Image: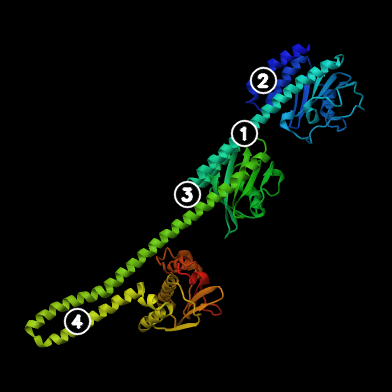
Amino acid sequence: MTARDLVEVATDLLDHLNHFSHRDDSKTFWQRALTWLQEQTCANGAWLELSAPTPLALCVGELDKTSLAFAQTWGTEPALAPEAGFEVHRLADATLLCVWLHAPASAGAAPTRGPRPRGRGDGSLDAGPRGHGGPAWADVPVGYLALSFPPETSWPDNKCTQFQGAIQALHTLSHQATTLAQTQDRLHRFQHLYEVGQAISSTLDLDQVLKQSADRVTEVLRAEASTLMLVDEDKRELVFKIPAGPAEHVLREQRMPMDKGIAGWVATHGEPVIIPDVDTDNRFYTQIDTLSGFRTRSIMAVPLQVKGKIIGIAEVINKIDGGSFTADDQQWLSILAPLIGAAIENARLFTALREEHDRIIAAEEQVRHELARNLHDGPAQILSAIILNIDMARRQLAARPEKMATELNFLESLAQEANQEVRGLLFSLRPLALESHGLTAALTQLVERARPHTTYEIHLDFNALSSTSIAPRVSSMLFVIIQEALNNTTKHASAQNVTIRLGTSAEHLWAEIEDDGVGFDVQEVDAHYNQRNSFGLLNMRERARLIDGGIAIRSPRPGQTAGTQVRVEVPLERACSTG
């Protein structure tokens, strides 16, 4: 085969391979290329081993055991200088042309841990050119190829060099096709990354965010299944919130201990993992496969974190092609994980805000119902009585005018009672003393109004309160909280004494309402107050939040076996501001 023939054949091959080099994987490319090379060189067989860009070992044609063993070990010895291009070895039953493959110069590759050249002290007959002046790719060996010929075959050095050039051209094409495929795959993944980001940021529905994320992760990583697990901190469990795959209906909302399984390890250590074979990893939690009937072979899992806090796990299971997850897969999922975590947190915050909004509306509705009931049972009834007695007085005036004085006195008492009822309602809604004289004066009036109607003693203690002026909005919110606490005491506590305290510390303005009543189970009431249709605690907590304060409800009260203490703390800077 002349150099011209070799060029023509190589051109034909490049045209032939162009159809599939951009579509098939590296193994398919080389399977076809080696078959063509074997036919064109009349070789009996060929052996190929690559370490980059994609690790590969491949044999085509017929190689006897001795030739195959020699070819497989030829590239493992590290002594031959990297710039050597080829060697010819004559064995008992075959002649082997062994050619080094190098990364193209444009690839900018660095030496790898793949096959290394071997020295000449092995009985080799010929060696390729050494020293300076070699091709630009001669510094970076990434694999080798051995062609097996009949034992009597021989060539001049220039023919070996031609073979080497053709083989290197094949490798360059393969390398570029593989690099292009990898680049296209990365672009494809980044496109998916953008689409996932757009999808999960377009909704605040938590289940929809999780479902879209799980489906896209399964698709992009070509996995048989995936799942997004959320951390239940109270129970120290992982919840299969959105599984995707054959067992998704079985696994949905299933739970597993947070200290079990590979996902549990990731959740507790905060590190991603790739497990190519779960049967060799003692962290694998077999109960999930037993429950679902699904066979797990390999797993990749990454933590979902928000502000350094792990809120869940993204896990993908079993590559569809049977292979293992790669570092590129892990990198892509690790880039996506913060987006998923942020979307989950935003959806949670939105859900909590919506639920809080609904509770506040319900609480306001209850207040309106209570106001309507109080108006109906109080002033409205009195006004009805006044109207009725005015009609009676009109008749009395014609029949017995001497009785008018008594009737007018009775009407006056009814009017005064109605006036007191209305003033009481107005005071409970917005006491004028709060605006004109401040919080302590309003609380004093509140106690004076309450004392005739309570069975317990009310004590006021403002001794710890400094002369700091309290902002009107803070005064208003504290007044409502204290008023609500007194109402709760009247309804439920069976107390003999109630103490209201106001004070300031170095950092806070605080208020305490403490009683010596029977107390209650705070956690149980918190868990079921929606079902109780009682919004007193919600009102107090919401008012505290509106002034950047915190509220603590303790029952029994500190140091006692009964009673209740409500303590509100407002940052002093906020309490004294006018905003």
Say which amino acid is labelled 4: Leu
Tell me which label, 2 or 4, sits earlier in the chain: 2
Could you give the CA–CA distance between mark 2 and mark 1, rounded to whole angstroms?
Answer: 20 Å
* 2 and 1 marks in contact (CB < 8 Å): no
Tag 1 residue:
185
Bin the neighbour count of mark 1 within 10 Å (Cα to Cα): few under 14, some 14-19, many 20 and up.
Answer: few
Could you give the CA–CA distance between mark 4 and mark 1, rounded to whole angstroms?
Answer: 91 Å
Residue nearest the viewer, comparing 237 with 144 = 144
Could you give the CA–CA distance between mark 3 and mark 1, rounded to whole angstroms?
Answer: 30 Å
The residue mark sitting in front, 3 or 1, is 1
Q: Indicate the quadrant where residue 77 lies.
A: top right
Secondary structure found at label 4 = helix
Q: Which mark is residue 361?
A: none
Tag 3 residue:
205
Say which amino acid is labelled 1: Asp
Secondary structure found at label 3 = loop
Tell me which label, 2 or 3, sits earlier in the chain: 2
Tag 2 residue:
17
Say which amino acid is labelled 2: Leu
Bin the neighbour count of mark 3 within 10 Å (Cα to Cα): few under 14, some 14-19, many 20 and up.
Answer: some
Q: Which color scheme did the rendering employ for the protein?
A: rainbow
Identify the residue at horizontal 19%, vertical 81% (top origin): 411
Tag 4 residue:
411
